Image (cartoon, rainbow, N blue to C red):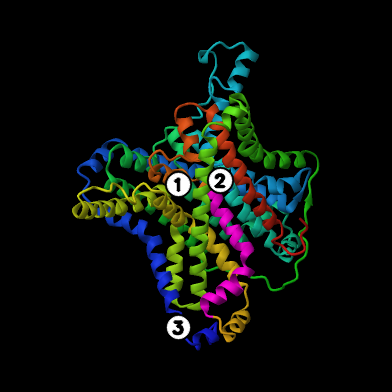
Amino acid sequence: MPAYPHIKNGLSTPLPWLLAVLVLAGLAALPVLVVAANLLAPSQGTWTHLAQTVLGDYVVNSLALMGGVGLGVTLGGVGTAWLVTMCRFPGSRPLEWALLLPMAMPAYVVAYAYTGFLDYSGPLQTGLRALFGWKSMRDYWFPDIRSLGGAITVMVMVLYPYVYMLARAAFLEQSVCVLEASRTLGRGPWRSFFGVALPLARASIIAGLALALMETLNDFGTVQFFAVDTFTTGIYRTWLGMGQPAVAAQLGAVLMMFVAVLIALERLSRGGAKSHHTTTRYRRLPRLALTGWRAALALAFCALPVVLGFAVPAAMLAVWTVEVGLAQSFGGDFLHLAGNSLILALAAGLAAVTVAVVLAYAQRLHPGPLVRLAVRVASLGYAVPGSVIAVGIMVPLIALDRQMAQTVERWTGASPGLLLTGTVFALVYAYMVRFLAVSAGSVEASLAKVTPSLEAAARTLGCGTVAALKRVHLPMIKGSLLSATLLVFVDVMKELPATLIMRPFNFDTLATRTFTFASDERLASAGAPALAIVLVGLIPVLLLSRAIAKSRPGESE
């Protein structure tokens, strides 16, 4: 029997919605298809040059980043999630939400902050020289933050929350009976963790790990600033430095292979095993009380990521802002930059949520395999690095611009210049493709909670599909729509690779200006725009923490 018989047997088949889904899925998949289509394009010897010079570094550094970040975020995310969920120690309650704070910090901002804090003229080395009487670098050794190891460390600091939040949600959902059965069989807390809780949470942990590694492959600001050659920096240099869009697309295709492997491994890790709750009654999770050195060790282990991933870089940004002067930091063109960022983020958020509503509602009206496939294809953009999406959009837009310019010039005798390439429209399109999955998941989950009987009542009262959506569904899911818009808004505020490649001429945002200041070694001047990005990013982090805390019935906030 159909899920919505009143629609199946109604006055009309929702063909317009089906066509809308297919068109939107095609637009979302266009960048990926363009990149894949350029695999066989002639490279004019550029690939030979890359293979002889930097291609090996791209592969080795990308794999090393993935390996180091993967290990770090897994240990940090799973360990902290288990401790704050299953143990009681001083500070454990505040740390439940504080451990998510580094998510508000873009990796490139943390990289700039730690470079200013740890370099030769920074406060740490200056203090050490004053304390021990050292005169120059010949008198002591200090690790170089601008290195592959530094990039791995910085990314671990800001990406471990992806594993933490999914692992903690999985631990909150676990059955008390299973844990008690493990304890009655003679297993201690640690053996129960490794033998029971960890295997049950494996799918969630690997999903968080996959998200962290995708963000690692997408990163540009950190690796560029630390002079670590990866595929993302290679795409940027090949496009803007060498003027080879086809080769940039080919590098993007190789980078997508890395992402495809990550997705495949995440799917395979689930296997055929499944676990289900057999009751709707939840008991409060038993928390092991830690005392003495165990409590101190747990507190140190959980507090260290918060201090290093948020407190230290935030303090450094604040110090820079004050040193430069509040009038200078927030004066000049700061408001103009903030306005550009806000307009782009709001436009992208509204566009992504609008498309997500169309996709989710069409899937509700026409729940066939074709629509499900189209919705899934449209939501794959989050797995594709921003630099790849930018190249995949710019290549066809350049060709279209040339064709339009030739047509207009043939008719009028005057060239109109670029009409689509390097415009705000193209940039918002890239953001929408990149972050559509962020809004689609929230909208689809919320729409699924609306009972079909309400829609049936609206249809019997003469409402069409559009009217039913406007009068019944949207008012009921407006909270989720606002949340989805906010999530996309914050992601766009932080996005750097796509913005650098696609922004219009003389058009800067807070993110690009922060990158420009840092590239010019004007780290103090980067404090104000970076701090503004971080403050905006705190809003969804706090909302996310609240949602996770409420995910288990019967648990207090």
Q: Secondary structure at mark 2?
A: helix
* SS label for mark 1: helix
- The residue wearing badge 2 is 159
Q: CA distance from mark 3 to mark 1?
A: 41 Å
Q: Earlier in the sequence, mark 3 or mark 2?
A: 3
| Amino acid at pointer 1 | Asn
Can residue 213 be seen in this snapshot? no
Q: Which residue is mark 1?
A: 218
Between discs 3 and 1, the one toward the N terminus: 3
Mark 3 vs mark 2: give the one in front.
Answer: 3
Residue situated in front as seen by the camera: 2 or 131: 2
What secondary structure is the stretch in magenta mostly built from?
helix
Magenta stretch: residue 469 in it? yes
Per the image, the residue denoted by label 3 is 13
Cα–Cα span, label 2 and label 1: 12 Å
Note whether residue 399 is visible.
yes
x, y percent for residue 364? 52, 75
388 vs 126, left or right, is left
Q: Are marks 3 and 2 in contact (CB under 8 Å)?
A: no
Local crowd size for mark 3, using a 10 Å CA cut-off: few (<14), some (14–19), many (≥20): few
Magenta part of the protein: which range? 464-491
